[in-house]
Image (cartoon, helix red, strand yellow):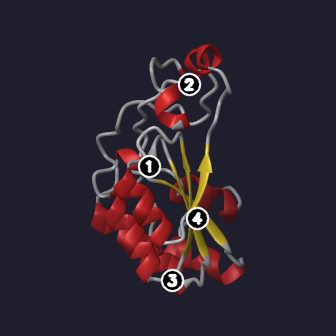
């Protein structure tokens, strides 16, 4: 079954696969794209929620959306990715570490042999999280906005986060 879409399939996939809570994508659409394209990596926005309010944010992040995907829906999507032979998953946000089930998602991806990378502001990386990320070989893209506290706080619109990120 195929839906009639008036824009290229890769644009449809980008719009539907990257936005949490968007429930208008269907497995048939993803399979159709998978037949026509070789997907090596999927960027997946785990949440819109963010503990920063960066002046340059392109994700328009902040508050958690009411209709963000549940763990089982995320796992189902990643199972589809596995069937399509996707090799790696990049987790983005908002701030991915704000999801209460973040470690469950990492463990699920690792058990399914995905290469995992993530974008984070680093402010929520505890020893436990760092240990789990290391054990699961997660590549971390740490966003460092400035090397001095005043500039960092100005860009991220935060207070007292600089020391926590740089420790």
The answer to which of 152 and 53 lies nearer the viewer is 152
Res. 89 in view: yes
Q: Mark 4 and mark 1: span between their CA atoms?
A: 33 Å
Q: Earlier in the sequence, mark 3 or mark 2?
A: 2
Q: Mark 4 and mark 2: span between their CA atoms?
A: 38 Å
Callout 3 crowding tier (Cα within 10 Å): few <14, some 14–19, many ≥20: few
Q: Are marks 4 and 1 in contact (CB under 8 Å)?
A: no
Residue pointed to by mark 3: 113
Marking on residue 96? 1
Q: Secondary structure at mark 4?
A: loop
Q: Mark 3 and mark 2: span between their CA atoms?
A: 33 Å
4 with respect to 127 (left or right) = right
Q: Mark 2 and mark 1: span between their CA atoms?
A: 15 Å
Residue pointed to by mark 2: 54
Residue pointed to by mark 4: 4
Q: Nearer the viewer, mark 4 or mark 3?
A: 3
Q: Position of residue 151 (x, y in %)?
A: 64, 16
The answer to which of 109 and 83 lies nearer the viewer is 109
Q: Nearer the viewer, mark 4 or mark 2?
A: 2
Residue at horizontal 43%, vertical 40%? 48
Residue at horizontal 43%, vertical 53%? 46
Q: Position of residue 148 (x, y in %)?
A: 65, 21
């Amino acid at each position: 079954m195929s839906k009639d879409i008036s824009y290229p399939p890769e644009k449809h996939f980008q719009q539907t696969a990257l936005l949490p809570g968007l429930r208008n994508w269907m497995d048939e659409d993803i399979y159709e794209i998978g037949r026509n394209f070789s997907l090596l990596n999927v960027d997946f926005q785990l949440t819109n929620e963010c503990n920063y309010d960066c002046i340059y944010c392109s994700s328009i992040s902040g508050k958690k959306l009411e209709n963000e995907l549940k763990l089982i829906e995320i796992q189902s999507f990643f199972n589809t990715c596995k069937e399509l032979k996707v090799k790696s998953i990049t987790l983005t946000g908002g701030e991915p570490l704000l999801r209460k089930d973040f470690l469950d998602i990492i463990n699920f991806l690792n058990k399914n042999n995905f290469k995992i990378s993530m974008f984070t502001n680093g402010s929520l990386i505890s020893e436990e999280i760092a240990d789990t990320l290391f054990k699961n070989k997660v590549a971390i893209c740490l966003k460092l906005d400035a090397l001095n506290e005043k500039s960092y706080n100005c860009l991220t619109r935060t207070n007292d986060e600089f020391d926590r990120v740089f420790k």
